[in-house]
């Protein structure tokens, strides 16, 4: 069973929804998204890409 | 307001370098999220050239909505970002304008929080700059909720890409026992299955390749993976 939403939760949700809609409208304006050709150029010029995970730090107790 | 016509990825890379130079430590304290983060996972998958899990073939219409020209980070709130960048948040564009970049700082997502994004981040190494990107399984969980709750075409594409990336990575890690971290592998598998219950059972390519790879793992430290496979991968059909 979920907890009842507080007024603050609802206000936060409403603000996030409004911000998201605003931002999506911006994305949809002409020129604000990459074209397929631009994506190809970006990809070709990227160079070697490595995505690395963080190493765990071992806490030593001795 | 549209982004400058000369705005290209090399310029974004130059700007990331600039951010690092102008604000030392900045890139260490923020995590790239959103479509930009997904794009890096897309490129990593492309560079792997995996025969089973290639980058999906996107249509022209899909490519046209794949990536927008704003760059989303998590790790600073807007007030902090405004002070640091010395520029106000532009409500019209919903971004900060900084030397050709359109930057936004998301304070909360549906699954993403600044805490879990920063704690689980991965480092992206390019020839000239290192920065951090949100963990793929966390982004995938976010996209799985977004496609259920919002009508945004890019989310479906990003979800699909992240699913292929994660499937490929799960297999590649299993197939490289020397570098495999069993606890991390199982933890990520659990996180992904929580986000999408049918992730492992719904793709025969994935199940077949994982089973074959897991069968070859014989060291005691791999027991957790065998145990996971018994419960989550099922028997071969």
Image: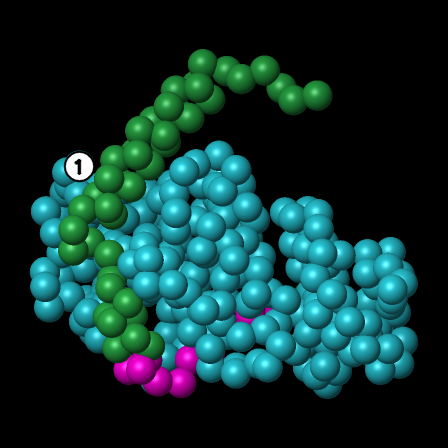
- Identified at 26% across, 77% down, the residue is A41
Point out the stretch of residues depicted in magenta.
Answer: A44-55
- Identified at 20% across, 54% down, the residue is A32
Give percent across and percent down for residue B136: 53, 60
Badge 1: chain ID: B
Give percent across and percent down for residue B126: 37, 79
The chain letter of the cyan chain reads B
Q: In which quarter of the image is the C terminus of chain B?
A: bottom right
- Identified at 70% across, 62% down, the residue is B203
Figure check: B150 above or below A47: above
> What scheme was used to colour the molecule?
by chain
Figure check: A19 above or below B190: above
Q: Judge left or right: residue B119 versus residue B190.
A: left
Tell me, yes or no, if residue A53 can be seen here: yes
Figure check: A44 above or below B88: below
Figure check: B137 above or below B18: above
Q: Mark 1 points at which residue?
A: B91
In front of the other: A1 or A57:
A1
Give percent across and percent down for residue A12: 40, 25
The chain letter of the green chain reads A
Tell me, yes or no, if residue B75 can be seen here: no
Q: Judge left or right: residue B214 versus residue A49.
A: right
Element at label 1: loop
Give percent across and percent down for residue B95: 21, 46
Question: Crowdedness of circle 1 by 10 Å Cα count: few (<14), some, many (20+)?
Answer: few
């Amino acid at each position: 069973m979920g907890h009842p939403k507080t007024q603050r939760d609802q206000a936060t949700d409403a603000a996030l929804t409004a911000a998201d809609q605003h931002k999506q409208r911006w994305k949809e304006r002409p020129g604000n998204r990459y074209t397929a050709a631009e994506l190809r150029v970006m990809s070709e010029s990227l160079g070697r890409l490595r995505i690395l995970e963080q190493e765990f730090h071992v806490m030593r107790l001795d | 307001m549209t982004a400058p016509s000369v705005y290209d990825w090399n310029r974004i890379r130059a700007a990331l370098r600039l951010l690092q130079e102008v604000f030392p430590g900045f890139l260490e304290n923020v995590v790239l999220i959103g479509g930009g983060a997904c794009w890096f996972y897309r490129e990593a998958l492309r560079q792997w050239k995996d025969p089973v899990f290639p980058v999906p073939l996107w249509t022209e219409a899909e490519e046209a909505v794949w990536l927008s020209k704003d760059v989303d980070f998590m790790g600073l709130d807007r007030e902090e970002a405004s002070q640091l960048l010395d520029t106000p948040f532009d409500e019209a564009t919903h971004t900060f304008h900084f030397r050709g970049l359109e930057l936004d700082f998301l304070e909360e997502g549906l699954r993403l929080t600044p805490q879990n994004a920063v704690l689980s981040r991965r480092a992206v190494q390019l020839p000239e700059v290192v920065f951090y990107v949100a963990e793929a399984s966390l982004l995938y969980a976010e996209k799985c909720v977004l496609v259920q709750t919002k009508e945004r075409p890019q989310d479906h594409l990003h979800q699909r890409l992240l699913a292929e990336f994660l499937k490929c990575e799960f297999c590649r890690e299993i197939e490289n026992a020397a570098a495999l971290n069993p606890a991390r592998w199982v933890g990520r598998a659990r996180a992904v299955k929580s986000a999408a219950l049918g992730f492992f059972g719904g793709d025969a390519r994935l199940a077949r390749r994982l089973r074959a790879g897991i069968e070859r793992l014989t060291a005691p430290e791999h027991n957790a993976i065998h145990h996971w496979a018994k419960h989550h991968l099922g028997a071969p059909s």
